[in-house]
Amino acid sequence: MIFLRFLLSLITPCSIGWAAVTLLPRRSASFSNIEKASLSFGLGWGILTLEMFYASLLKLPWSPFLLLLPWIVLFLFFFRRKKEKIAVAPLTRKVPLGSLERSLLLFLLFLFLYIVIEGLTFPLMYYDMWDAWSIWGQKAKAFALQRSVDFAFFTDPSRTYAHQEYPLLLPLSESWIYLALGKIDEQIVKLLFSLYYLCLLVLFWGALRREKSRQTSLLLVTLLATLPILLEYTLRAYAEVPLTFYYTLSTLYLYFWCKEGRREDLWAGVLFSAFSAWTKNEGQALWVINAVVFGTTRFLTSSSPVRKRIFEGGILLLPLLLLLPWWLLLKRLGISSSEFFPQLRGEILLTSLSRLPVVLQAFFSRLLDISRWNFLWIGLVLFGGLSWRKLFSFPKAPLTAALLLHLLLYLFIYLIHPLDVLWAMNVDDSLNRILLHAAPLAFFLLGSSLENLDTFLKAVYTGKRT
Amino acid sequence: MNPVQNFILNGVNRQRLSLCFVLAWSGWAVHMISSSLVVSFLFYPYFWGKDLEEKKRFLDGKLYEVAKVCERKIPPTEALFFYNPIPTEREHSMHTTPFFQEHDRQKLSYYLYPRRVYWEKQRMKEPIQYVLVYHAQLELPDFERLVALSDDIYLLRKKGGK
């Protein structure tokens, strides 16, 4: 019964997401059905939680009908126009799955069942899931019991440990599930993270598929699925996995927009950027990096008229509009959205340079730890070094630049951290945790550098070894 | 191009290198996942077949019991001061005791929502009607014992309070 209620809780976000995916501007059917379902899941939670926040600001109730209403209207208004375009999408010939693909899919199914069972066995209240109940779970419980965003929560001096300034995508998603379940259930809610993990893999596969063969894409996505730190944080129910999901996909879709110029990639990338900023504060800085890197690349490489390029650049600023009410609320309540802004002063920046050796050493020792990262970073340096021309020339160059800037940003955060830097990097595995956000992107670049894997797998399938 | 570069950049060798990498990754992944499964199976017996309530009771033991009592005794609109000066430990955890001092404070606050839980006097912005003494001894002149769970765990209430 409780599983049924959990599934029912997915209906509203997935319907909203599906309407949004259907309404994305597109010239051809770029997404397969399984990708559309995963996109609906990701977009749906992002849109639904923003709507829940706006509804609370307007003192409106969180009723599924009310939250669905704008999408029903939009859908009815625009769908007739879209329908024709969808119908003319070319159909791809279906090739039966080979034995390697079947084995990989079985292994992925095993992994998914493992994280579902393990996730349901250990509830949120487990010792190693501190942030899961203390930060995200505390807000989720509060908002579910109040049936609204409780604005008094943000200034309550007894709840400062819950990081009142953190964005609300995850707490509001959990609140929605609690309301559908009719109770606070810190066990079932963990299924949300298993679904984020699954959807990340599906959409990552879809992204790889645009550059590689089906077999290679499936092989690479299976390798990513086994990344120890990704499995660990899916099970710990931290915001890292939703943020990794949104950030990875925003970057990949913006990369494909620069490369192929499809408008639906731009919209998907921009919406996912907004939701990464709505998941964690790091997401806000990552959105700025993506907007600058991909906006500049597109402006310089596109052959379309300047006015159109400027318009597209304007779309990249959409997250600013969507999250403005949240930032204004924090400002009105006198809460700083980041502890790092006061650190951006000349004298602090100069003195923080003395931390550089310590921070660099910590970064390298973490990245070389194969018990958490397998051979991800070692492989990226090795194969990226061999393919450096490819990684630093168009179209891969903006993706490489985004990843490097992302890592530099995190290095900088620790340099200017207001607390003791060693403590800050070690507390609750903080450094490894934030490096997870960049892991799928690093893996995408690594996959691009693994030369001739496609040729080899094709040869295996046709029986002709090279 | 020197012979080393020529060897590394040769297409067939690059393909072999890629395959070796994929095999190394896969081998290590199987090792890591099987190790995780072994650890999980060691812990599963403590959790399987138990409902959420029992799991919370298992994980937080006395603290959860205390939270349940406080939930019954303290109205949702009230605030509580949590006095736990000595860190206590858990039976089934590798964490150090200082970890549990802060852990217990925040977890009690989580369990008791919407009641406000303070553990630092400087943060308190309102008069306190209840004090929970946890693994310690504390007597306050204006407070009386409302309920005692043991000699060193008891709830105090302000005299004449609700």
Image: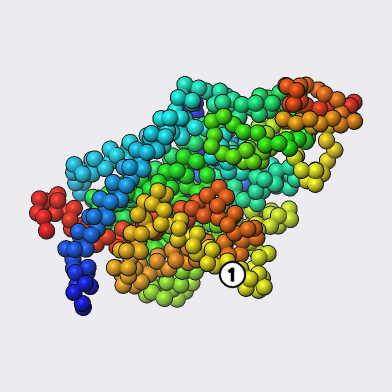
Question: x, y percentage for residue A71?
Answer: 51, 46
Q: Residue B39 or A276: which is nearer the viewer?
A: B39
Q: Residue B13 or A356: which is nearer the viewer?
A: A356
The reply, left or right, for residue B29 in relation to residue B120 is: left
Residue occupying image coordinates x 55% and y 47%:
A428
The reply, left or right, for residue A44 in relation to residue A140 is: left
The part of the image, by quadrant, that contains residue B2 is: bottom left
Q: Chain of mark 1?
A: A
Question: x, y percentage for residue A276?
Answer: 51, 54
Q: Label 1: few (<14), some or many (≥20) within 10 Å?
A: few
Residue B34 in view: yes
The correct choice, above or below, for A315 with respect to A302 in the image is: above
The reply, left or right, for residue A357 in relation to residue A109 is: right
Question: x, y percentage for residue B57?
Answer: 59, 25
Residue at the farthest left position: A464
Q: Quadrant of the C terminus of chain B?
A: top right
Q: What amino acid does circle 1 point to?
A: Ser
Q: Quadrant of the N terminus of chain B?
A: bottom left
Residue A171 in view: no
In this figure, which residue is indicated by the disc labeled 1? A354
